[in-house]
Image (tube, rainbow, N blue to C red):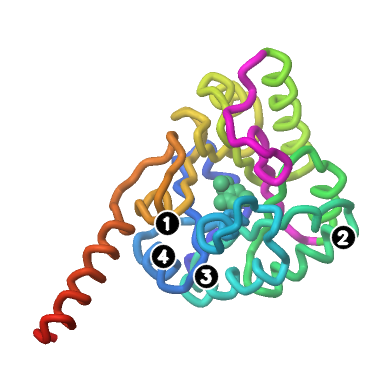
């Protein structure tokens, strides 16, 4: 197997940049594994980009297990991180129970938002590798504006990053913060930072797959579109409709 362990992902900090993408379904996971993407995140963004919810808070452990299973079947050789849904990580015991359900469904590690140091320590003590997430934390915000702009908020986020690394997380997602804060945190902690709207100096970058593919109708300003799948699908469907209607199919 070529599957990377949490330990080897952690070791990439000093070696080479980490390219991470989200995935929610088998065919996408298959394509991403074929492309050599070293780590996939089954994010709770699935609720927003695939299920039509306007918040990640409505995503459940059952939803996550369904999607983690689908991604695992498509990418058997790739490290998969599963997001712990909102409130399923509220205390160490609850989080351990939730994390075990995601691992059983096919995840190699779990990710959780915010300064939950006790939870991270408890997962690790029970053999479950954890990824932290600070900066913008969608489960506990109602707007998606950049955070860490003023000195006080920047210091809070930098402290959280230290705390998350100190608790034993093997990697840290930094979401939607100023470039210089992303750079500073990356320099000051021993685990790799993977940024989404956190500047070019993070140890890696993560994008939501639908944003990268131009699939959907709106994308965050910090994302990049490498294709326009939504338009491709509309064009293909239109051609089909036309050919059925003019009896050329
Ligand atoms: O759920 C998700 O896709 C995430 C990424 C935005 C990092 O947490
Ligand atoms: Na998430």
Q: CA distance from mark 3 to mark 2?
A: 24 Å
Q: Are marks 4 and 2 in contact (CB under 8 Å)?
A: no
Which mark's residue is nearer the viewer, 4 or 3?
A: 3
Secondary structure found at label 3: helix
Range of residues picked out in magenta: 127-150
- At label 2, counting other C-alpha atoms closer than 10 Å, the crowd grade (few under 14, some 14-19, many 20 or more) is few
Which residue matches tag 1?
A: 37
Report the mark closest to the observer, 4 or 2.
2
In the rendered image, residue 103, in percent from the top left (x then y), is placed at: 70, 68
Sequence-first disc among 4 and 2: 4
Q: Is residue 164 left or right of residue 79?
A: right
Q: Which residue is mark 3?
A: 71
Who's the residue at 67% across and 20% down the image? 154
Q: Which residue is mark 4?
A: 33
Mark 1 or mark 2: whose residue is earlier in sequence: 1
Front: mark 1 or 2: 2
> What residue is shown at x 79% (from left), y 64% (from top)?
98
């Amino acid at each position: 197997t070529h599957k990377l362990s949490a330990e080897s992902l952690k070791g990439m900090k000093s070696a080479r940049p980490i390219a991470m993408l989200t995935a929610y379904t088998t065919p996408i996971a298959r394509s991403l594994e074929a492309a050599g993407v070293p780590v996939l995140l089954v994010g709770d963004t699935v609720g927003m980009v695939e299920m039509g919810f306007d918040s990640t808070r409505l995503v459940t452990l059952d939803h996550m297990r369904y999607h983690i299973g689908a991604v695992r079947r498509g990418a058997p050789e790739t490290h998969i991180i599963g997001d712990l849904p909102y409130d399923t990580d509220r205390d160490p015991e609850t989080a351990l129970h939730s994390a075990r359900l995601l691992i059983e469904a096919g995840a190699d590690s779990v990710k959780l938002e915010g300064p939950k140091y006790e939870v991270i320590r408890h997962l690790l003590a029970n053999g479950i590798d954890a990824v932290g997430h600070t900066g913008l934390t969608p489960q506990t915000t109602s707007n998606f504006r950049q955070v860490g702009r003023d000195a006080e908020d920047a210091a809070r986020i930098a402290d959280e990053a230290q705390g998350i690394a100190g608790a034993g997380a093997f990697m840290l997602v930094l979401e939607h913060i100023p470039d210089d804060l992303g750079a500073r945190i990356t320099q000051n902690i021993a685990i790799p930072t993977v940024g989404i709207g956190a500047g070019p100096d993070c140890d890696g970058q993560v994008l939501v797959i639908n944003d990268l593919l131009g699939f959907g109708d709106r994308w965050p300003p910090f994302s990049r579109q490498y294709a326009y799948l939504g338009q491709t699908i509309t064009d293909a469907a239109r051609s089909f409709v036309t050919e059925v209607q003019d009896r050329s199919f």
